Amino acid sequence: MRLVLAAGYLIAGLAHLTRPEPFMLITPGWVPFPREIILATGACEIAGALALFGTRLRKLAGVMLALYAIGVFPANIKHAVDGVSIPPIPDSWWYHGPRLAFQPVLVWAALFGGDVIDWPLRRRPIPTSATAPCR
């Protein structure tokens, strides 16, 4: 999952840097310096993706990418509610509904992929005679 997450953030980061215009269409009006913010978030996505490959910064990357997923949620809402057309992305609630509902999964995936949490796939230690409860 970590590799899929890193690849997704790497691709998204490159898209933010090479084609910021579509992202500007969905950036809420209250965001200051939207172009610069979009370019900065692209750089952060790339840095987070690369950090997921190593071990030293993996947890920090997981936390930061989870915060990033929360931070871009207003843009996703604006995209859906305002019906902003960004081809080839479908402009229907068949796309936007699942996309908005999937955002918490992206937050979890960043934390899981960054080894910040292990839920729900926690490995439970096998009880031994020293750790088994007494009856």
Image (cartoon, rainbow, N blue to C red):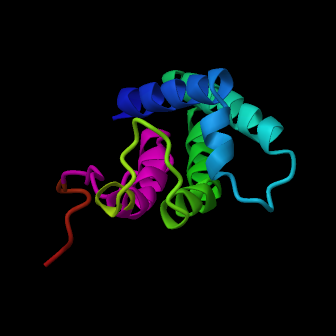
> Does 55 sit left or right of 118 as displayed?
right
Q: Nearer the viewer, residue 51 or 19?
A: 19
User: Where's residue 45, x and y in %?
Assistant: 61, 33
Q: Is residue 43 visible?
A: yes
- Residue 56 visible, this orientation: no
In which quadrant will I find the C terminus? Answer: bottom left
Q: Is residue 13 left or right of residue 112?
A: right
Q: Is residue 91 left or right of residue 74?
A: left
At x 52%, y 67%, the residue is 81
34 to the left or right of 80: right
Q: Nearer the viewer, residue 64 or 128?
A: 64
Residue 112 belongs to magenta span: yes
Could you tell me how many numbered marks the image carries? 0
Q: Residue furthest bottom?
A: 135
Q: In the rendered view, tell whether residue 93 sits above or below residue 11.
A: below
Name the residue located 39 percent from the left edge and 52 percent from the top edge: 91
- Where residue 63 appears, as percent x and y from the top left, is 60, 48
Q: Which residues are magenta?
A: 97-126
Image height check: is 76 above or below 88? Answer: below
Q: Residue at x 19, y 51 (%)?
A: 126
Compare residues 29 and 71 and report the one nearer the observer. Answer: 29
Q: Quadrant of the N terminus?
A: top left
Is 81 one of the magenta-colored residues?
Answer: no
The one nearer the camera, 135 or 11, is: 11
Residue 123 in percent (x, y) is at: 27, 49
Residue at image position (37%, 57%) is: 102
Res. 3 image quadrant: top left
